Amino acid sequence: MTVQKIIMTSGPGGFGTVDGELAVGGIPLTRLAARVGSTPFFAYDRSLIDARVALLRRTLPEALELSYAIKANPMPAVVHRLAALVDGLDVASAGELAVALDTGTHPDRISFAGPGKSPAELRRAVAAGVTIELESAIEARRVAAAGERLATRPRVAVRVNPDFAVRGSGMRMGGGPQQFGVDAEQVPALLDLLADLGLDLIGFHVFAGSQNLTAPILCEAQRRTVELIIKLAAGVADPIRYVNLGGGFGIPYTDRDQPLDLEPIADNLAALIGGPLTEQLPEARPVIELGRFLVGESGVYVTRVLDRKESRGETFLVVDGGLHHQLAASGNFGQVIRRNYPIAIGNKITEQPTEISTVVGRLCTPLDLLGDKVALPRTELGDLVVIFQAGAYGLTASPTAFLGHPAPAEVLV
């Protein structure tokens, strides 16, 4: 996705231009940088977060509940903002649980998923009264032990590793052997164990993949997810009250990516909720869990040019940030086919490109690459390089301790 398109389509209060500079939330970039006090930093625009939730509310079925996966961006200010807009929060650690509880969200609207939950984390989750999404029989026994110790009946759901995979996902998290969830064929035995342990089983969670931009594939996954959950629910004596259909909605990062078409997904979900889910599981509240789709396009990463150098015919712009803050934009330590995220010189946003430059960080690795041979205006020391689509899986998904540079600031504007 081009920078020009991002600016044109971000809407009121989002990204724009003021006096030749990028504006975030209506604030010119140099003024915002002065307010933050240093570079690099992440800036998240609350109006874009609000607009994304509003779009989903307008488009998706009214009966569908919306949950925010905190792992996408756990900045407390962002989580507090979203907690007021969505129906629930999903966490994956005791740290994220603390952030979620601090928002005032009722515990029965917080789910705790992820493999390898420690006994201490499970005790905290049981004590808080949140829904624990079980990933194994061992977790189930630990939860039951915590419930006995705390004299409470834990509320749980089963995270299922489906017997199908979702094509086209940026990261496959279901189908085949997985560390995530309980294999669908093993779920009946787990249900028997849960009954013996006396846990309060409220439902199921199926999440098969992330960062998918193809609506027909997501629709097929949702249909198969509903079929699987209905089949598994037949082995539960009490009514199912919770059906988490996962998420996986992607956002465009490059020119070749097309934004996800929500309309067919909305129609598909309406048919599933109004049909088999209502007919077979009338007491279940359907939930869709999104992270990147809610916050990814709301953020920018801003870093300042420290050096400009020529090497055998190529221009390198060395900035004070890098992969230790924004790993995804660098290509995840070389483990994926790298493509440039949208990138611009924020204080020269309206100037035309005049040269080809490569933007690198200051870490001692050639993998510290933020922009490979990109067309930019003539760039000088002190100019502000901006990477867009940086609202999700940025700072907390990066190796911040590498080389010991200071952590960047984060601001919600």
Image: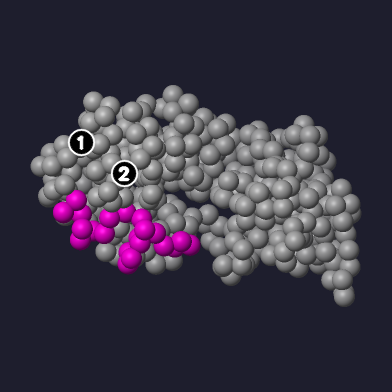
- Residue type pointed to by label 1: Asp
The kind of secondary structure element at disc 1 is strand
Q: Relative to residue 389, is residue 112 drawn left or right?
A: left
* Identity, as a three-letter code, of the amino acid under mark 2: Glu
Residue at 57%, 31% (x, y): give it: 77
Q: Is residue 179 magenta?
A: yes
Nearer to me, 14 or 139: 139
User: Residue 120 shows which numbered tag?
Assistant: none
Residue that carries the numbered disc 2 in the rendered image:
133
Checking the image for residue 200, the label placed there is 1
Task: Please name whichever residue, 106 or 380, is drawn nearer the observer in this view of the structure.
Answer: 106
Residue 386 at what x, y percent from top left? 73, 50
Q: In this view, does 172 lie above or below 70?
A: below
Q: Quadrant of the C terminus?
A: top right
* Element type at mark 2: strand
Between 133 and 296, the one lying in front of the other is: 133
